[in-house]
């Protein structure tokens, strides 16, 4: 199943970057997993977050976080409301369902009709 992560929300943080010590470059990005196949597409309830510094263009990993950054990230995780998970069938799936239903109903009709 091919999937990708969609950017849902980006939050600027006023904490110091552990790399460049700038106070207005940190951004917390929330991503939600999207799945797309030939039969359906949808969003899952799986959420990832990523902390980046726009000033020095680095990703800040949890091992580099200070206690202040950790507290702010925990707060933002609690305040974040993800999009609801869903699955939507594509045209091919509907055609397969309708075709299978038609085939089953036609075979039942023929079986009943030939037995009378």
Image (cartoon, rainbow, N blue to C red):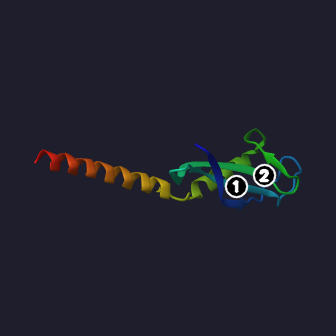
Residue behind mark 2: 52
Does the rendering let one see residue 111? yes
Mark 1 is surrounded, within 10 Å at the Cα level, by few (under 14), some (14 to 19) or many (20 or more) other residues, namely: some
**Residue at image x 75%, y 57%?**
27
**Residue at image x 54%, y 50%?**
38
Q: Secondary structure at mark 2?
A: strand
Q: Earlier in the sequence, mark 2 or mark 1?
A: 1
Residue 29, label in figure: 1
From the top left corner, tell me how far across and down residue 26 is, in percent.
79, 56
Please name whichever residue, 106 or 58, is drawn nearer the observer in this view of the structure. 106
From the top left corner, tell me how far across and down residue 46 is, in percent.
56, 47
Please name whichever residue, 44 or 55, is drawn nearer the observer in this view of the structure. 44
From the viewer's perspective, is 30 left or right of 63?
A: left
**Residue at image x 71%, y 55%?**
28
How many numbered circles are shown? 2
Residue 69, label in figure: none
Mark 2 is surrounded, within 10 Å at the Cα level, by few (under 14), some (14 to 19) or many (20 or more) other residues, namely: some
From the viewer's perspective, is 22 left or right of 28?
A: right
**Quarter of image, res 98:** bottom left
Q: Which residue is outermost to the top?
A: 63
Q: Quadrant of the N terminus?
A: top right
From the viewer's perspective, is 114 left or right of 50?
A: left
Q: Secondary structure at mark 1?
A: strand
Whole-angstrom CA distance, mark 2 to mark 1, is: 8 Å
From the top left corner, tell me how far across and down residue 100 is, in percent.
36, 49
Check contact, mark 2 vs mark 1: CB within 8 A: yes
């Amino acid at each position: 199943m091919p999937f990708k992560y969609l950017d849902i929300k980006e939050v600027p943080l006023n904490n110091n970057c552990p790399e460049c010590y700038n106070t207005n470059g940190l951004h917390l990005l929330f991503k939600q997993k999207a799945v797309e196949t030939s039969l359906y597409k949808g969003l899952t309830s799986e959420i990832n977050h990523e902390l980046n510094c726009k000033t020095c263009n680095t990703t800040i990993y949890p091992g580099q976080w200070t206690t202040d950054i950790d507290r702010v990230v925990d707060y933002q995780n609690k305040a974040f409301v993800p999009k609801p998970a869903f699955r939507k069938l594509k045209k091919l799936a509907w055609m397969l369902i309708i075709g299978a239903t038609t085939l089953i109903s036609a075979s039942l009709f023929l079986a009943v009709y030939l037995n009378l």
